[in-house]
Image (cartoon, rainbow, N blue to C red):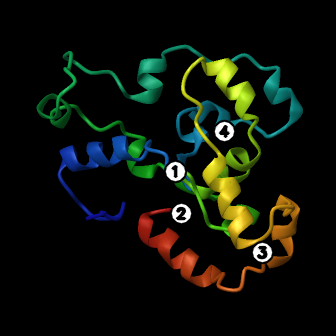
Amino acid sequence: MFCLPGRRMAASFRFRRYIVGFVCAQTIFILFQVFVFYPCVVRAPLDLDLLKREADTTNLDAQFDQTVPYPYAAHWESLDNRPIPSWYENAKLGIFIHWGVYAVPGYAVNGPSEWFWYWWKIDQDFLQRRRKAKVITGESVKKFVADKFSSDWQYSDFAPQFSGEFFNPEKWVDIFKASGAR
């Protein structure tokens, strides 16, 4: 079950949610904003001189409140006892959508279909020379295109069919809000 950020829960679950937040889905990428980790940058004015400034590295432990009074091991019991960083409760969750023409055929050899073009057009000889191993074949994608469309079909031929007919932004917003994105 996914817990919304506003709910109260045990520290161990909050920390687990913190770790899970860094897991990246292939199509919907869930990213914590970088500014959460660098509060001194957030307070700085947004101008081109910002890139030239040196980062304030004095007393970083106090700034980030991430010092741990004891070492911890890489197992859940130890992590459950670790304090949650003070910035975590106010961390923002962002969602990035990558939706493209590859959704029209909706076919994938393995993994997400956004790699459709790669598997369709990859130079198999190059792949075999490069990996010096069994060729990862794009033949199933080529066969799929030839069977469903035509042998001379091009990737750009999918574009007119990419209509967004079932695109429902209101439903997406509801899903994103329910996931904790702000």
Compared with 35, 115 (above or below) is below
Report if residue 100 is visible in the image.
no
Asked if disc 4 and disc 1 are in contact, CB closer than 8 Å, the reply is no
| Disc 4 to disc 2, C-alpha distance | 19 Å
Residue identified by numbered label 4: 43
| Residue 148 visible in the picture | yes
Q: Residue at x 66, y 81 (%)?
A: 167
Residue type (three-letter) at the residue carrying disc 3 = Phe
Mark 4 vs 2: CB contact within 8 A: no
Instruction: Tell which circle, 4 or 3, labels the residue nearer the N-terminal end.
Output: 4
Question: Marks 4/3: CA distance?
Answer: 42 Å
Percent x, y for residue 95? Answer: 57, 58
Determine the secondary structure under disc 1: loop
Lower position in the chain sequence, tag 3 or tag 1: 1
* Residue matched to label 2: 182
Mark 3 vs 1: CB contact within 8 A? no
Task: Quadrant for residue 12, please give it.
Answer: top left
Single out the mark in the foreground, 4 or 1. 1
Judge from the rendering whether residue 168 lies leftward or rightward of residue 80; answer left or right. Answer: right
Distance of mark 3 from mark 1, alpha carbons? 21 Å
Q: Position of residue 11 (x, y in %)?
A: 21, 46
User: Closer to the observer: label 4 or label 3?
Assistant: 3
User: For mark 3, what is the residue?
Assistant: 162
How far apart are the alpha carbons under marks 2 and 1?
Answer: 29 Å
The answer to whether 103 appears left or right of 78 in the picture is: right
**Category of crowding for the residue at label 3, using alpha-carbon neighbours closer than 10 angstroms: few (below 14), some (14–19), many (at least 20):** some
Q: Amino acid at mark 4?
A: Arg
**Is 18 located above or below residue 179 in the figure?**
above
- Asked whether 39 or 169 is in front, the reply is 169
Front in this rendered view, residue 21 or 130: 130
Judge by depth and name the residue closer to the eye, 102 or 72: 102
- Badge 3 marks a residue whose secondary structure is loop
